[in-house]
Image (tube, rainbow, N blue to C red):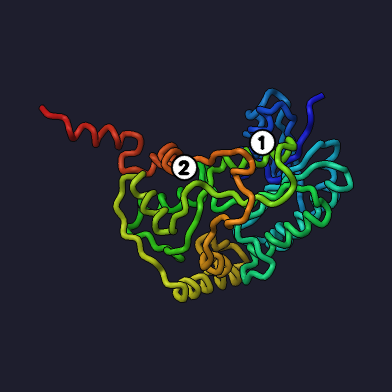
Amino acid sequence: MSKLVTIFGGSGFVGRYIARRMAAEGWRVRVAVRRPNEAMFVRTYGAVGQVDPILCNIRDDASVASAMHGVDAVVNCVGVLNELGKNAFDAVQADGAERIARLAASNDVDMVHISAIGADLESDSEYARTKAQGEANVLQHMPGAVILRPSIIFGTEDQFFNRFAGMTRMSPFLPLVGADTKFQPVYVDDVAQAAVQGVLGKASAGVYELGGPEVKSFRGLMQQMLEVIHRRRIIIGMPFLAAKIMAGVLDIVKFVSFQLFPNNILTRDQVRNLRRDNVVAEDAKGFVDLGIEPATLDSILPEYLWKFRPSGQYDDIQNSAKNLRI
């Protein structure tokens, strides 16, 4: 019988790519999510019955144990960028990771854990601190785990380039918090490929920092995005003090509205994160150690940002037609 892997958060942005690759490797894939009825699309990633979404809450031992029953490996992709309800940073990124690792160790299965560049136990950002705490919790129970720390991840379903490209449809301005902060964007399928190598035992235990071939400032990334979508917009660097005040007001509105307003715009924790560069450390293991050549932004962005061009898929045709001589 083929081997079985459980991917926690397997219908999310990164998890779905890992699920697709694991199915291509011939593994049976169990996609553990809170709302399996919204994850039925993962069934198309393999043969009939090969990929199966199941209900799981990583805040509950019994639920995680059930999702892990009979598996050969687990991958934890669960994380949050903004706290909402019971899905707080500590509950998901620290305690949830610990629970998965503890039960994986008791079941003697391999584990790959998705963290993030910038994870730091001493950070003033709860996101970064709990990412680091999650790593520590995983290594406490699973010292042989493979931990992946990607920089900002881009791809068809991303909430980075898609979000800002969408803003260009409504405004002549692009306000940026941390315009000079540096990023090393990494293609989502390259992260998935690294995770699969961890599951297959082709990557040695330890922490890998994953960044693409290009390091650019936030402003530089937006300029490149504007070139791809054929639009001109004024990029405005927002001072951190102004951003902190704005985020504070939005967080207060979220609190007084009992989270009916979830504040998906800007939080104080995100402002803290944007103060720091998000690039691979010089001494870190990375794609080179995994034998993976990461994709460039130029090779991927046009594949999914074309829809934000003034004339969408017909923009290149229209521009070409302007050069016709009658």
Residue at (66, 65) in percent of width and height: 120
Q: Position of residue 26 (x, y in %)?
A: 71, 26
Q: CA distance from mark 1 to mark 2?
A: 23 Å
Q: Is residue 322 visible?
A: yes
Task: Kindly give the residue lying farthest to the left in the view shown.
Answer: 326
299 over 211 or under it: above or below: above
Residue at (47, 53) in percent of width and height: 215
> Mark 1 or mark 2: which is in front?
2
Task: Kindly give the residue lying farthest to the right in the view shown.
Answer: 106
Residue that numbered label 1 is attached to: 19
Q: Are marks 1 and 2 in contact (CB under 8 Å)?
A: no
Badge 2 amino acid: Thr
Along the horizontal axis of the image, is 173 left or right of 68?
Answer: left
Near-viewer residue (286 or 181): 286
Q: Is residue 34 visible?
A: no
Residue that numbered label 2 is attached to: 296
Along the horizontal axis of the image, is 38 left or right of 165?
Answer: right
Which quadrant does the C terminus fall into? top left
Q: Position of residue 16 (x, y in %)?
A: 63, 39
Near-viewer residue (83 or 224): 224
Residue at (82, 57) in percent of width and height: 140
Which quadrant does the N terminus fall into? top right
Q: Secondary structure at mark 2?
A: loop
Q: Secondary structure at mark 1?
A: helix
Residue at (75, 30) in percent of width and height: 28
